[in-house]
Image (cartoon, helix red, strand yellow):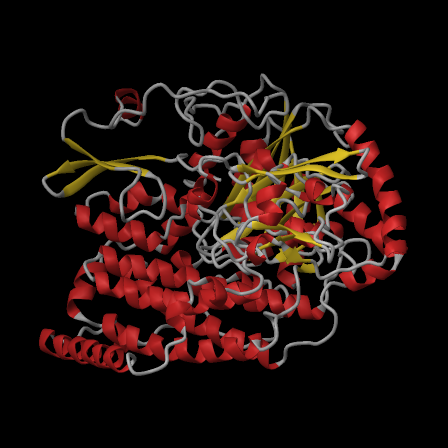
Amino acid sequence: MGNSRELFQKCEDQFGNSRLTEYRPMEWVLVADLEKLQEDFSFLKVHCQFNLLLDICGVDNLSKKEGNLSGKRFEINYHILNLEEHIRIRVKVYLDEKESLPSITALWKGAEWFEREVWDMYGILFNGRPKERILTHHEFIGHPLRKDFDPKKRIPLSSPLPLAPHDTRKLRGLPEDGHWLNIDPSHPITKGALRVMVNLEGEKIKDVLLEIGYLHRGFEKLCEGLNYNQIIPYTDRLNYCSAALNNIGWCKAVEELMEIEISERAKALRMVFGELARVIDHLISLGTMAEDLGAPTGLWFFMELRERISKLFTSYCGGSVNPSLTRVGGMSHDLPLGWVNDCLNTVKSVEHSMDDLSKMFSQLPWWMDKTRVCPIEAKDAIEWGFTGPCLRACGINYDLRKVSPYYYYGDVEFEVPLGSKGDVYDKYLVRMEEIRQSLKIITQVLDYLPVGRLNIVDGVSLPEKSEVYKDKKALDKYRSLIRDGIKVKPGEIYSAIEGANGELGFYIQSDGGNTPYRVKVRPPCFPLFQSFSEIVKGNYLSDAYATLVSLNIVPGELDR
Amino acid sequence: MILKRELYQRHGYFKGILIVLSLQMSRLLKMFLSVFKKDEGRLAGSEDQRSSKYKGMLALTVNKQGELQCTGCGLCQAVCPSDCIDIQFDKKKKGVGAFNIDLLRCVFCGLCEEACPIDGIRHTAEIPSPGHFEQNWNIGIATLAYRKSLNNGKGLLSEYTFDQQDLNQDNETVLQDEGQTSNA
């Protein structure tokens, strides 16, 4: 704690009292000048160890009624993390339509795709960066997240992007010769649609081009027209392997923005379902890894375990893939009778099977031959903005559940597994161990599951239906809550949870209405996939497949 | 937690083959033995095995007289995130004129079921498939409440029954509300 005060003092001396504020514990806001931006960033990175760039997020202030103090149209929020002191800083810059920002890819390699996304969505240029689309297609006209863009406008695509297009090659200084190979949008090794184009020399990879955006559904634009509870079913579709974690992340962000405290039972249940979802995500990731590396039966062993856990979701809320199980202020409903017993039985049986499975893969010569490839250095991982199992596989002890515990993660016992080299085998081992630790957390929480009512927040949670039947007042309250939705006071927040793939953050800006003004998801896959081309360069094609599955890219979350 | 060092030491090929073979054999044996066991998991896909919360095809419930339970208050329409519900209010009948659901828009989230104060709309365990409605994904009251799979065409009985007085009172406020929204 002392260190963080010192750090704050140091920053305050540099930036001045008026520009730097601490709006929540361990979360600071810095309002920066456009001219001095580059200096500020290098001070933050070099002297204050803010070394992990989390997110760059633009906001269009066009239809904001009040609160736009600067009078300029756009604002850009950079979220940067200090890994040592666990402090997040938001650097805020205001700028007009014709102004452009300095590019910060020299400081953080991972900024490249985020900057491209800002240009794609808002049309804000970064100095020295070409105009490149990323989430929308290459014939798209306009910038969809501007407030004056009509979302009903359709811009059809006449022809797909050709294999390794010449202008992109020229842009990146890639050679003209060599054999280009398309790993198509619908390749069996991907968990959705993404495109990898590789330049081969023999069997070695010389260059890689990536194309994403096939699953871009405009989640962030969609959120601007829906109220806070209506968005929950859509968060299911972000990372569809672990949908419950997305629900929890979204609701936690909204609750922190509203500054409400949910009941103890709801917190405990969220932990249980979150960990179950994490187990499912890791199982799918490991299963597909086994299948793609030439052990197709492995997929069925992992999927069988996943099926057992999915049944717990189905019996609780009816959907195993898209559960939508949280609501702002609690959970959708209480546990059915006998669920806890089923869950404990399942956890025990899964733990038992995990031992078998780890015997079947770990230490085996052919498995190690195929997976001890493509190591990632810890330094590079931080530069790219890795989080989650992939960062821990590089040997960096950073888990949000440990370092800034939310809910009851501070009270349960679990350990954070760490790899050493960051290669595919390390990622496999870290995921295997994390499943065991998650199961351990679940049993601990279920042992001390708090009792009492689930949804207790006044003015946010719906009244019980039995009350609504009898009482006229309760009915009126119920109707107004459903018709108008929840009102959230004006403000902004960046709130993150430890998702299955890494830090899943939600940035919400509210202008006091019942729909959010701006929502930005910080998807853990985005920086992971960005680094792919550099990791696999110089390796064999089969190693590229192994790396792609071990990074666990889920396009639903990548493209939003 | 640093992972155990043994995990990084590789087995020999012969040992590896032995380990995998023994594990696979024991799995095979278990599979054969499971034929004699009474299996619970195998039928998990059938309708009666699914949980009562299953979010399948939507259904409108009926009251004891066999009429629609829905009063047309429009709460489900307001809460639906994908705008798939369309309710036309019949002022002469003082009830629902038409209730249409566009199934291709529906995301099966269950918010409408949660929003209905009188248990008028419910998710059933049926899975919607094109065979149900032949090309017609926009379904009305006839399919929603009185299709054959629901009690042989009689409809599902609602859990909530209100007596006549309640009904009138509620209906009046609901009517006023509905008039306003439909005008707007």
x, y percent for residue B36: 29, 83
- The C terminus of chain B, quarter of image: top right
Give residue B41's quadrant in the image. Answer: bottom left
**Tally of numbered tags:** 0
x, y percent for residue A38: 53, 33
- The N terminus of chain B, quarter of image: bottom left
Query: Can you say whether A159 is above or below A116 in the image?
Result: above
Query: What residue is rendered at 15% in x and 75% in y?
Result: B16
Query: What residue is rendered at 52% in x and 74% in y?
Result: A441
Query: What residue is rendered at 22% in x and 81% in y?
Result: B29
| Viewer-side residue, A216 vs A91 | A216
Relative horizontal placement of residue A543, taking residue B71 as reference (left or right): left
Q: In this view of the protein, can residue B118 be seen by the observer?
A: yes
x, y percent for residue B53: 58, 61
| Viewer-side residue, B78 vs A175 | B78
Q: In this view of the protein, can residue A66 be seen by the observer?
A: no
Relative horizontal placement of residue A357, taking residue A541 as reference (left or right): right
x, y percent for residue A383: 42, 46
| Viewer-side residue, A425 vs A288 | A288
Relative horizontal placement of residue A178, taking residue A171 as reference (left or right): left
Query: Can you say whether A508 is above or below A429 in the image?
Result: above
Query: Can you say whether A554 is above or below A268 in the image?
Result: above
Relative horizontal placement of residue A203, taking residue A518 as reference (left or right): left
